[in-house]
Amino acid sequence: MVAVLAVVTIVVSGCGSKTNGGGFAPAGGGSPTSTTSGPTPTTSSSAASSAASQSALPTPSTMTTAQLKRSVLDAYKAYMAAYERAYEINSTSELSQYAVDPILGRVTKDIQADAAKHVIWRFHNVLNPRLQGWSTDQALVVVLDCVQNLGWYKYSLATGAKIGSKNLGNSYYQTHVKYVQGVWKIADVKVAGRC
């Protein structure tokens, strides 16, 4: 097994934040919105452009540090945008372009449980990632991020009513990104510790 450089151990805690409110149309005509400022807001279009940019990657062992950083962080941001969308539509079909097991299986199970309850979650995370370390062959990279969560809002698919919310605040995300068949994919994410 390939050794990974410096892994931090973080204690779980959190603090709350709020977003601007918004509406929800079960037929798909509207969605809650939030105005954010921060280092790296994610969007579905950024996920699509990042996926396109991954198509012709050199092998990690031949990448310069700048190429490694750029390609891994693009993949991480694309995953985070697809992650938000997966909870919004109760489907991991798009997420599977950016993730592999074990994280893909865990998120899929969680979203299937939401679908069975006829609810969706809408939220937004503001990102500020950096590379924490990588394996000798650079095929496994660890990304550390202080993610600012602007709140999770639960909606009923039957009525469109907001039926719950939770605020996760700012947390450390430690993400393992693997080079899989020519592209970077998220393999695991650990969330812990207030940042």
Image (cartoon, helix red, strand yellow):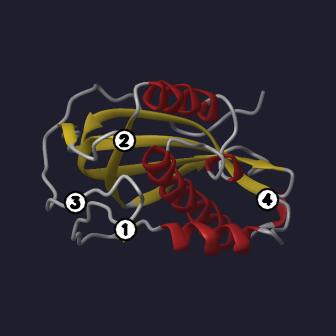
Circle 3 packing at 10 Å, graded few (<14), some (14-19), many (20+), is few
- Depth check: give the residue in front, 116 or 100: 116
Residues at circles 3 and 2 in contact by the CB criterion of under 8 Å: no
Circle 1 packing at 10 Å, graded few (<14), some (14-19), many (20+), is some
The residue indicated by pointer 3 is: 23
Q: Amino acid at mark 4?
A: Pro
Q: Amino acid at mark 3?
A: Gly
Q: How many marks?
A: 4
Q: CA distance from mark 2 to mark 1?
A: 26 Å
Residue 139 shown left or right of residue 7 in the figure: right
- Depth check: give the residue in front, 30 or 36: 30
- Depth check: give the residue in front, 4 or 96: 96
* Camera-side mark, 4 or 2: 2
The residue indicated by pointer 2 is: 157
Element marked by disc 3: loop
Element marked by disc 1: strand
Circle 4 packing at 10 Å, graded few (<14), some (14-19), many (20+), is many
The residue indicated by pointer 4 is: 60
Q: Quadrant of residue 74?
A: bottom right
Residue at left 63%, top 75%?
A: 49
The residue indicated by pointer 1 is: 41
Q: Amino acid at mark 1?
A: Pro
Q: Earlier in the sequence, mark 3 or mark 4?
A: 3
* Camera-side mark, 3 or 1: 3
Residue 150 shown left or right of residue 79 in the figure: left
Q: CA distance from mark 4 to mark 1?
A: 26 Å
- Depth check: give the residue in front, 151 or 162: 162
Q: Earlier in the sequence, mark 2 or mark 1?
A: 1
Image quadrant containing the N terminus: top right
